[in-house]
Image: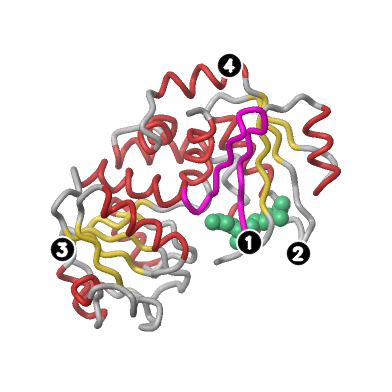
Amino acid sequence: MTRLKEDWIRDIEMGMKEYERELVGKTGITLLDLAAKSNGIHPDRIREAAKSYKVAAVPVKAGEGVIGTFSQSVAAILHHLGFQVIITESTDVDGIYEAWQSKAHCIFLADDQRFLGIHPSKNQISDNNIATAKGYITALEQVAGSLARRKVLVLGYGLVGKRMVRLLLEKEAQPVVYDIDPVKTADLAPDMVLKDRESMKDYPLLLDVTNQGGWVCEEMLHPEFWMAAPGVPLSLSDELYRKYEHRVIHDLLQIGTAVMMGELCK
Ligand code: 2YJ
């Protein structure tokens, strides 16, 4: 699991409008619509919740500590969806206490292992790994149409990759997995495993959940590929990303965080 860096996320807060414009340009829907669709709810449900929910982003010092602008970025994404958001001054357990004192309905917080959204009074919790899997599959469906009976290549078989495979099977798609470590995919049926990454070019639909940057070269891409890529750093080199940005859905926090909020509105 990649730990985010301040350098990567510092523009999120100021760039939400531009982010939205690009997302709509590629997928035809807004971040709020995507959060709703990924959770099978009407967008109005999120809009209604946004009128009354107060959300607290709690910085967490535990482990490797606070990442500059992490809580601010989470707050900006949720604010963009219409929610009233505070960032607690206190961190960790004291921050949770501050959130409760401020009468926040939902709390968003992350340590080095997990990023959660919690709605205590509804006894609901949202895990960023699950939300990310749902959000990027929905984004891929949005650009490529129904995935049923179509092969989808999942690059990387970690926590999010596994969740994606489960969701794809539920959607009656045909997931095929590539992971650099063959031990990870040993339990999968042989026809669900891509052994050699040179064959990637046969797959136009890609979900990239790897955490190694720049290992995909142009010859490995199908001429009409679509890539939905929560993996950080991105598998495409900066140069390839610039060339094919119109075919790649990729961000560092926005889709996962928005889908978490959608889940808490269910
Ligand atoms: O509050 C803070 O600023 C930090 N404790 C945030 C830590 C963010 N955590 C990560 O980047 C981890 N890799 C977990 C992310 C889970 C994404 N699926």
Q: Earlier in the sequence, mark 1 or mark 3?
A: 1
Check residue 51 for magenta coloring. no
Residue 123 lies in the magenta stretch: yes
Quarter of the image where ligand 1 sits:
bottom right
**Which disc, if any, is residue 51?**
4
Residue 50 appears anywhere in the view: yes
- When the figure is inspected, residue 160 is found, relative to residue 155, above or below; the finding is above
Q: Secondary structure at mark 1?
A: loop
Query: Callout 2: helix, strand or loop?
Result: loop
What type is the residue that disc 2 sits on? Gly
Q: Earlier in the sequence, mark 4 or mark 3?
A: 4
- The label on residue 223 is 3
Please state the total of marks drawn on the protein image.
4
Whole-percent x, y for residue 141 in the image: 25, 44
Q: Where is residue 216 shown, x and y percent of the image?
A: 33, 74
- Identity, as a three-letter code, of the amino acid under mark 3: Pro
Q: Which residue is found at the position 67% from the left and 33% from the top?
A: 120
Query: Distance from label 1 to label 2 (Cα)?
Result: 9 Å
* Of the pair 64 and 133, the residue shown nearer to us: 133
Kind of residue indicated by mark 4: Lys
Q: In the figure, 251 relative to 90: above or below?
A: below
Question: Mark 1 vs mark 2: which is more N-terminal?
Answer: 2
Residue that numbered label 2 is attached to? 63
Residue 260, relative to residue 246: is it above or below? above
Whole-percent x, y for residue 254 in the image: 50, 44
* Mark sitting earlier along the chain (1/4): 4
